[in-house]
Amino acid sequence: MNEIDPYVFFAVMFGSTLVEPYIGELWIATTADTVMKDAVSQQQMMSEEENLERMQEEADDIAGKVAMAEEAKLKQRKREVKIAMNMRTRIEPYMDGSVAEDLFVLGCQEEAEKIAKGSFGATFLVTIGTALQLEADEFLGFQKSFMGVDGHMTRMKKRANSVQSNFKIVSSGLKAASAGRKVYKEVESAQQKVVQAREQETLKAASAAVEGTATEKTAEEISKEEKEKEETDAAQAALAAAKIEESIPAILELAWAVNVRDISRTLRKVCKKLFSDASVSVEERQKRAVAVRIMGKEFFNVGKEAGGTMPIKTDTGDIKARAEVAVMTTMAKAQGQEVSEEDTEDLIRQAKTQAAAEAELNKEKEQETPQK
């Protein structure tokens, strides 16, 4: 069985391929990868550890968690270095003067417009643009303003954004948890009703047998009961799926809140590397900050114009289609097949069209049923 690659899965889910040079591998993908590897490892080691003492098991568990934490830190540092190198390469034409400022601005705009065409491109642009502008403004503020007043003001703005980001995660988490509990209760309630109905039928049959009033069922009756049971089970599965779908927007909102904080924190460290690089002069570092600010400003403006400051889209059909295509894509890549972002977007559109057609067909069938 092919394993799901969390990086590929979330890249398709969030359409982050074009912004990968500026955000790297999202924390949510790295965490999912770690959890999946841990689960597989535990499953493989289960039979081997059955006879070990409990103390040894706990010690191994603690050591494993420490190792994973260190591995995650190392992975994050590598991510920051890689992004910093990508950023340095991106602004190099502006730095060495081979591209004038107006052409550099135009290039940033064109890149941003291409990114904005993705499903979540506008949101990525606003998040990245905000982070880059704040980091550049803080550095330049401390470097050029009187007594670093502008730098202190920007730092206060950054703290306010951080508080808002944390609050968003908490509120989204509560909303997702509430949606999850609601789904669980509704599905459980429906299942209990079915179980109770079947128990009553069983008791009724047993009572009839005791009283001697029971009659032997015909093959047709037995077939009818089995068909009704299958239909009931199918209806229960459909209800569970429908209720889970209702909670998807809340879960996606939480995922995006986590992504925003992750991207902001990562770019803060990336910019720190660029602006504190001792291998170049202070003037060069200041020029880097100017270039980064230009880039951030253009990304933010294009993203805002494309609706990136608005709440993320919660089209359940789009989310489901993306999830299905994400799984297919990661499986295809695991087999060595090349799948471009254009291919995935085409597949997503096809999946949405097919899902809409199936929904319309089911609706027509439901409308026809009472007439029979």
Image (cartoon, helix red, strand yellow):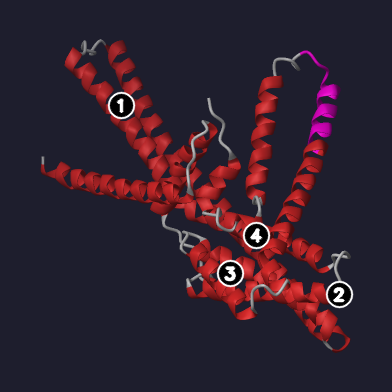
Residue 108, quarter of picture: bottom right
Q: What is the span of residues highlighted in magenta in the rendered image?
A: 51-65
Q: Could you tell me residue 339's position as x and y percent?
A: 47, 42
Judge by depth and name the residue closer to the eye, 250 or 2: 2
- In the picture shown, does residue 79 fall above or below 69? below
Contact? badges 2 and 1 (CB < 8 Å): no
Left or right position of 321 against 287: left
Which disc number belongs to residue 180?
none
Q: Is 317 in the magenta? A: no
Q: Earlier in the sequence, mark 4 or mark 3?
A: 4
Main SS of residues in magenta:
helix
Q: CA distance from mark 3 to mark 2?
A: 29 Å
Per the model, the C-alpha gap separating discs 4 and 1 is 54 Å
Q: Position of residue 17 (x, y in %)?
A: 55, 53
Calculate the distance from the C-alpha at mark 1 to the C-alpha at mark 3.
52 Å
Do the CB atoms of the residues marked 4 and 1 lie less than 8 Å apart? no
Q: Is residue 125 left or right of residue 142?
A: left
The label shown at residue 22 is 4
Mark 4 and mark 2 lie on one chain; the one further toward the N terminus is 4
Q: Give the label on residue 126, or none.
A: 3
Q: CA distance from mark 4 to mark 2?
A: 24 Å
In the rendered image, the quadrant that contains the C terminus is: top left
Task: Give amino acid for label 1.
Answer: Lys
> Which residue is label 1 attached to?
229
Label 1's element?
helix
For the residue marked with disc 4, what is the amino acid? Tyr
The disc label shown at residue 282, or none:
2
